[in-house]
Protein backbone atom coordinates (compact mmCIF):
# COMPACT_ATOMS: atom_id res chain seq x y z
CA UNK A 1 0.00 0.00 0.00
CA UNK A 2 1.32 3.40 -0.99
CA UNK A 3 1.07 6.28 1.49
CA UNK A 4 -0.38 9.56 0.19
CA UNK A 5 -0.39 13.00 1.71
CA UNK A 6 -3.44 14.83 3.02
CA UNK A 7 -3.01 17.24 0.10
CA UNK A 8 -3.24 14.29 -2.33
CA UNK A 9 -6.50 13.16 -0.70
CA UNK A 10 -7.95 16.67 -0.85
CA UNK A 11 -7.55 16.66 -4.64
CA UNK A 12 -10.00 13.77 -5.04
CA UNK A 13 -13.55 15.01 -5.60
CA UNK A 14 -15.42 12.03 -4.15
CA UNK A 15 -19.05 13.16 -4.16
CA UNK A 16 -22.45 11.67 -3.43
CA UNK A 17 -25.12 11.67 -6.09
CA UNK A 18 -28.47 10.09 -6.91
CA UNK A 19 -28.94 7.66 -9.78
CA UNK A 20 -31.47 9.19 -12.18
CA UNK A 21 -31.28 6.74 -15.09
CA UNK A 22 -29.82 3.34 -15.93
CA UNK A 23 -29.65 1.69 -19.35
CA UNK A 24 -28.15 -1.53 -20.63
CA UNK A 25 -24.74 -1.17 -22.29
CA UNK A 26 -24.77 -3.99 -24.86
CA UNK A 27 -21.58 -2.77 -26.60
CA UNK A 28 -19.49 -3.29 -23.45
CA UNK A 29 -17.08 -6.24 -23.34
CA UNK A 30 -18.43 -7.33 -19.94
CA UNK A 31 -22.05 -7.05 -18.77
CA UNK A 32 -22.51 -3.38 -17.87
CA UNK A 33 -24.94 -0.54 -17.43
CA UNK A 34 -24.69 3.09 -18.40
CA UNK A 35 -25.56 4.99 -15.23
CA UNK A 36 -26.54 8.68 -15.01
CA UNK A 37 -26.04 10.27 -11.59
CA UNK A 38 -27.18 13.70 -10.42
CA UNK A 39 -24.42 15.25 -8.30
CA UNK A 40 -26.38 18.43 -7.54
CA UNK A 41 -26.46 21.95 -8.98
CA UNK A 42 -22.69 22.59 -8.88
CA UNK A 43 -21.67 19.43 -10.79
CA UNK A 44 -24.85 18.34 -12.56
CA UNK A 45 -25.69 14.98 -14.11
CA UNK A 46 -22.80 12.80 -15.24
CA UNK A 47 -22.76 9.36 -16.88
CA UNK A 48 -20.52 6.35 -16.40
CA UNK A 49 -20.20 2.76 -17.47
CA UNK A 50 -20.48 0.32 -14.58
CA UNK A 51 -19.99 -3.45 -14.38
CA UNK A 52 -22.59 -3.89 -11.64
CA UNK A 53 -25.20 -6.02 -13.39
CA UNK A 54 -24.63 -9.11 -11.21
CA UNK A 55 -25.78 -7.56 -7.93
CA UNK A 56 -28.02 -4.67 -9.08
CA UNK A 57 -31.02 -4.34 -11.35
CA UNK A 58 -31.83 -1.15 -13.22
CA UNK A 59 -34.89 -0.76 -11.02
CA UNK A 60 -32.92 -1.18 -7.76
CA UNK A 61 -30.40 1.47 -8.84
CA UNK A 62 -32.85 4.26 -9.73
CA UNK A 63 -33.04 6.72 -6.84
CA UNK A 64 -30.07 5.12 -5.02
CA UNK A 65 -27.42 7.41 -3.59
CA UNK A 66 -23.91 6.44 -4.73
CA UNK A 67 -20.40 7.80 -4.44
CA UNK A 68 -18.33 8.80 -7.43
CA UNK A 69 -15.04 10.48 -8.29
CA UNK A 70 -16.08 13.44 -10.43
CA UNK A 71 -12.72 15.06 -11.22
CA UNK A 72 -11.07 12.40 -13.36
CA UNK A 73 -10.79 13.32 -17.03
CA UNK A 74 -13.50 11.72 -19.22
CA UNK A 75 -12.63 8.24 -20.48
CA UNK A 76 -13.86 6.75 -23.74
CA UNK A 77 -15.40 3.31 -23.13
CA UNK A 78 -16.64 1.96 -26.44
CA UNK A 79 -19.26 4.37 -27.77
CA UNK A 80 -19.70 6.36 -24.53
CA UNK A 81 -17.56 8.90 -22.68
CA UNK A 82 -17.50 7.99 -19.01
CA UNK A 83 -17.57 11.23 -17.01
CA UNK A 84 -17.04 9.93 -13.47
CA UNK A 85 -15.89 6.82 -11.62
CA UNK A 86 -18.64 4.98 -9.75
CA UNK A 87 -17.02 3.56 -6.61
CA UNK A 88 -17.43 0.12 -5.12
CA UNK A 89 -15.73 -2.90 -3.63
CA UNK A 90 -14.71 -5.77 -5.91
CA UNK A 91 -15.42 -9.18 -4.38
CA UNK A 92 -13.24 -12.24 -5.06
CA UNK A 93 -15.95 -13.36 -7.50
CA UNK A 94 -15.53 -10.14 -9.52
CA UNK A 95 -18.89 -8.75 -8.47
CA UNK A 96 -18.96 -5.10 -7.37
CA UNK A 97 -20.70 -3.88 -4.21
CA UNK A 98 -21.34 -0.15 -4.51
CA UNK A 99 -19.93 2.30 -1.95
CA UNK A 100 -22.95 4.18 -0.63
CA UNK A 101 -23.72 6.49 2.30
CA UNK A 102 -25.63 4.73 5.09
CA UNK A 103 -27.95 7.75 5.52
CA UNK A 104 -29.41 10.12 2.92
CA UNK A 105 -27.20 13.19 2.39
CA UNK A 106 -27.46 16.22 0.07
CA UNK A 107 -26.43 15.62 -3.56
CA UNK A 108 -22.93 16.84 -4.31
CA UNK A 109 -21.65 16.52 -0.75
CA UNK A 110 -17.91 15.77 -0.74
CA UNK A 111 -16.42 12.90 1.22
CA UNK A 112 -14.29 14.32 4.01
Image (spheres, rainbow, N blue to C red):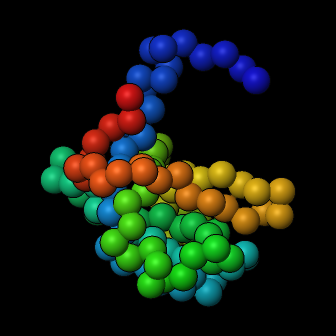
Measuring 64% from the left and 69% from the top, which residue is drawn there?
51
Q: Nearer the viewer, residue 93 or 4?
A: 93
**56 left or right, relative to 92:** left
**Looking at this rendering, what residue extends furthest in the front direction?**
103
Check the picture and name the quadrant holding the N terminus: top right
**Looking at this rendering, what residue extends furthest in the left direction?**
41
Asked if residue 87 is positioned above or below residue 58 in the image, the reply reads above
Measuring 78% from the left and 63% from the top, which residue is drawn there?
94
Query: Can residue 32 be seen in this snapshot?
Result: no
Asked if residue 34 is positioned above or below residue 11 in the image, the reply reads below
Measuring 39% from the left and 67% from the top, which residue is drawn there?
64
Where residue 41 sits: x, y (%)? 16, 53
Q: How many marks?
A: 0
Where residue 15 sits: x, y (%)? 36, 44
Query: Can residue 72 be seen in this snapshot?
Result: yes
Asked if residue 8 is positioned above or below residue 39 in the image, the reply reads above
Asked if residue 10 is positioned above or below residue 59 in the image, the reply reads above
Check the picture and name the quadrant holding the C terminus: top left
Where residue 72 sits: x, y (%)? 47, 43
Where residue 44 sits: x, y (%)? 24, 57
Amino acid sequence: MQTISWEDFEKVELRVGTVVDVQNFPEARNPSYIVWVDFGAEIGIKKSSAQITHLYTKKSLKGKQVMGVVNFPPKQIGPIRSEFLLTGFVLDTGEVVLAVPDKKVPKGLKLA
